[in-house]
Image (spheres, rainbow, N blue to C red):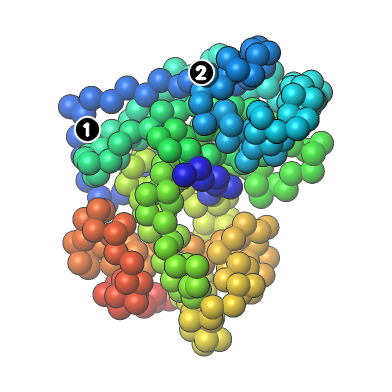
């Protein structure tokens, strides 16, 4: 089944020390090679050829990502031509192609290394194919069966003028960089393989789930910086470290941890310039950082493997056995 992810909490392969020993994965035979779906989309005019080459991925890309329907729907041809001839889309494709011309080999290596760690921790899992595309700034990642699609127009660089002209928020644009693609892909893999099964959950359950995904990304991208893991700037990161106890006490004392109110959950765990209840100096999604700290302490206390962690859905157990109680 096709899945679409709007992900901005991303990470990079940058030097950073973690207490967990990095396993040696040199003997794992994986070689990721990116499929340049974007080139064919802008060069092949025959829809039958595209459908034959890419199958359901082409259909789902057009229908769910571009929103122009499936190839057999009315007005598809004209809508597809409009997409390809759109001046902003054409500019974004040119910039994305320019980035890939110089960065594709590096990205192949980064993805290969990340999936080697994935295979180390989850030897029974399949390794997907990687496609890249330009979609007119629609979803940055899609998962369709055994294919992951990467929207390169969401990774043109934090100083890209297109983003400024389109009014993208600064707190999102700071993470829209090519160096962050590999770990965002792994985050999508984690969400796809280990979804939050329940559609009715509390704030603490969402926090711990997001903490699990962050921990998963950290283990598969072990050389990332903590700032890039959380998508925080230096000041945001320092705020969380300096106010860990205060944030936790706020949630406890205001009886918010077990709230199942969607608005409450969203304002603490979803993208925003800052977390309103924690002050304007805090980052958006600050509660996810707390969730990560809970997960981290749970793993340290119980010596739980990554596989068991990701399959553990008893969030009350994770909280209890983490013995989480931040000090000043």
Q: Residues within 10 Å of mark 2 (few under 14, many from 20)?
A: few
Tell me the SS state at disc 2: helix
**Residue under the point 54% across and 15% down:** 102
Tell me the SS state at disc 1: loop
Q: Is residue 100 above or below residue 111?
A: above
Q: Residues within 10 Å of mark 1 (few under 14, many from 20)?
A: some
Residue 35 drawn at (x, y percent): 48, 20
Q: Nearer the viewer, mark 2 or mark 1?
A: 2
On-image quarter of the C terminus: bottom left
Q: Which tag, 2 or 1, sits closer to the chain's start?
A: 1
Residue 157 drawn at (x, y percent): 64, 32
Occupied quadrant, residue 70: top right
Q: Is residue 328 above or below residue 22?
A: below
Residue placed most toward the observer, 30 or 222: 30
Residue placed most toward the observer, 241 or 77: 77
Residue placed most toward the observer, 131 or 283: 131
Drawn side of residue 288 relative to residue 63, left or right: left
**Residue under the point 26% across and 53% down:** 306
**Residue under the point 31% across and 57% down:** 310
**Residue under the point 79% across and 43% down:** 167
Residue 210 drawn at (x, y percent): 45, 60
Q: Is residue 274 above or below residue 41?
A: below
Q: Which residue position is annotated with label 1?
A: 25
Q: Which residue position is annotated with label 2?
A: 53
Drawn side of residue 309 relative to residue 293, left or right: left
Q: Is residue 143 above or below residue 309?
A: above
How far is disc 2 from disc 1 in space, using C-alphas?
33 Å
């Amino acid at each position: 089944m096709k899945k679409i992810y709007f992900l901005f909490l991303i990470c990079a392969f940058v030097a950073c020390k973690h207490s967990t020993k990095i396993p040696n994965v040199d003997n794992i035979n994986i070689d990721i090679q990116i499929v340049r779906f974007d080139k064919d989309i802008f060069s092949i005019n025959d829809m039958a050829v595209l459908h034959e080459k890419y199958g359901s991925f082409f259909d789902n890309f057009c229908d769910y990502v571009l929103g122009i329907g499936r190839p057999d729907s009315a007005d598809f041809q004209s809508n597809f031509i409009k997409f390809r001839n759109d001046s902003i889309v054409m500019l974004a494709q040119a910039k994305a192609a320019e980035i890939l011309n110089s960065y594709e080999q590096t990205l192949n290596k980064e993805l290969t290394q990340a999936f080697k760690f994935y295979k180390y921790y989850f030897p029974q899992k399949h390794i997907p194919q990687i496609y890249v595309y330009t979609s007119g700034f629609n979803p940055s990642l899609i998962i369709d069966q055994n294919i992951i699609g990467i929207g390169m127009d969401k990774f043109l660089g934090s100083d890209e003028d297109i983003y400024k002209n389109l009014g993208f928020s600064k707190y999102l644009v700071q993470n829209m960089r090519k160096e962050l693609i590999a770990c965002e892909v792994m985050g999508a893999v984690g969400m796809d393989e280990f979804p939050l099964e329940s559609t009715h959950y509390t704030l603490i359950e969402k926090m711990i789930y997001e903490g699990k995904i962050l921990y998963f990304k950290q283990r598969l991208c072990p050389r990332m910086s903590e700032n890039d893991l959380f998508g925080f700037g230096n000041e945001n990161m320092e705020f969380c470290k300096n106010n860990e106890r205060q944030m936790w006490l706020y949630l406890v004392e205001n009886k918010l941890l077990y709230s199942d109110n969607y608005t409450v959950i969203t304002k603490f765990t979803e993208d925003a310039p800052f977390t309103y209840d924690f002050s304007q100096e805090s980052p958006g999604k600050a509660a996810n950082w707390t969730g990560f700290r809970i997960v981290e302490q749970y793993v340290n206390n119980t010596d739980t493997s990554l596989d068991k962690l990701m399959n553990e859905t008893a969030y009350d157990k994770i909280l209890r056995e983490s013995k989480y109680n931040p000090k000043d």
